[in-house]
Amino acid sequence: MILESRIGGVRTAGRIVEVEAYRGPDDRAAHSAGGRRTPRNETMYGRGGLAYVYLIYGLHHCLNVVTADAEQPQAVLVRALEPIAGLEVMRRRRGGNVVDSQLARGPGNLARALGIDRRLDGHDLRRGPVRVLLPPDDLGVIRRGDLVRSPRVGIDFAGAWAARPWRYSLRAHPCVSRPKPLDKREATCRSAVRERRPGRSSPR
C-alpha cells in the first residue's frame, strides 16, 4: 500500500514497508487497553479508515490507521515507508542531509517527512490531504514470503502481549526501522551457528 500526503499542496508519498497491529481492549500494549477512552485516543473508537494521530514524548507524531468498526478500538501503526515521491520535500522537512532510506524510517520521522501532525487526527484516509492508496504496478507484487513477523517495539510493559508477533515488515528492506526484525529463518540459522561453535555442547 502507498501512503500519500498533499500537505501544503506538495505531494510526498511512500510504499508502506513496516507496520504494527494493536488489537484493542484485550491488548495491553494498545492505547485502548482495558477499554481506556480519553480525548487523546477517542479516534480509535471511530470507524475503520480514520487517521489516529498522537504525539509521543512531546516531540514526535505517530500515524495509525483505525481498522475495525466503530466502538471497536483497533488500529495499525505505520512505522516506515520506502519514499517514492517528493524526496527533497521530505529531506527539507526532516532537516539536514538525510539519506533516502532514512527519510521515513520510524514513525516519528515518517510523520515529519510527510507533514503529518495532530491536526489530521480523525481525518478520513480515503480522501483529502493524506490517503492510503493501492500501489502502482511498477512497484511489483509483495508475496507472503517477503513479509517478516516479529514482536512490536518498545512495549515491554505489556507483559505477555509484548511477545505477540504483530510487527510486520518487508524482509531485509533498508527502510525498515530499528531494531531490525529477526525472522524465524534467520533465527534458526543463527542458532545453528552458535551450536556449531567449538567448545559448545549440542542440545539434547
Image (cartoon, rainbow, N blue to C red):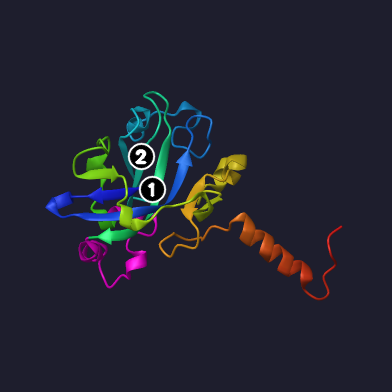
- SS for dot 2: strand
For the point 53% across and 35% down, the residue is: 27
Query: What residue is drawn where x is 82% and y is 70%?
Result: 200
Q: Furthest residue to the left?
A: 9
Residue 204's place in the image compared with 44, above or below, is below
In the picture, measured across the screen, residue 27 lies left or right of residue 137, that is right
- Can you identify the residue that label 2 sits on? 65
Amino acid type assigned to the residue bearing label 2 in the image: Val
Q: Position of residue 171 (x, y in %)?
A: 50, 59
Where is residue 105 shown, x and y percent of the image?
A: 38, 60
Q: Is residue 4 above or below residue 39?
A: below
Asked whether disc 1 touches disc 2, contact meaning CB atoms under 8 Å apart, the reply is yes
Residue neighbourhood size for the residue with mark 2, other residues' Cα within 10 Å, grouped as few (<14), some (14–19), many (≥20)? many
The quadrant holding residue 139 is bottom left
Q: Which residue is mark 1?
A: 78
Residue extending farthest top: 71
Query: Mark 1: which secondary structure?
Result: strand
Q: Position of residue 151 (x, y in %)?
A: 56, 49
CA separation in Å, label 1 and label 2? 8 Å
Can the viewer see residue 59 in this picture? Answer: no
Residue 74, how many percent across, how many down?
Answer: 43, 33
Quadrant where the C terminus sits is bottom right
Relative to 5, residue 98 above or below: below
Query: Which residue range is magenta in the image?
Result: 86-111
Classify 10 Å Cα crowding around label 1: few (below 14), some (14-19), many (20 and above): many
Please say whether residue 98 is visible from this viewpoint.
yes
Q: Amino acid at mark 1?
A: Val
Residue 72 quadrant? top left
Residue 9 falls within the magenta-colored stretch: no
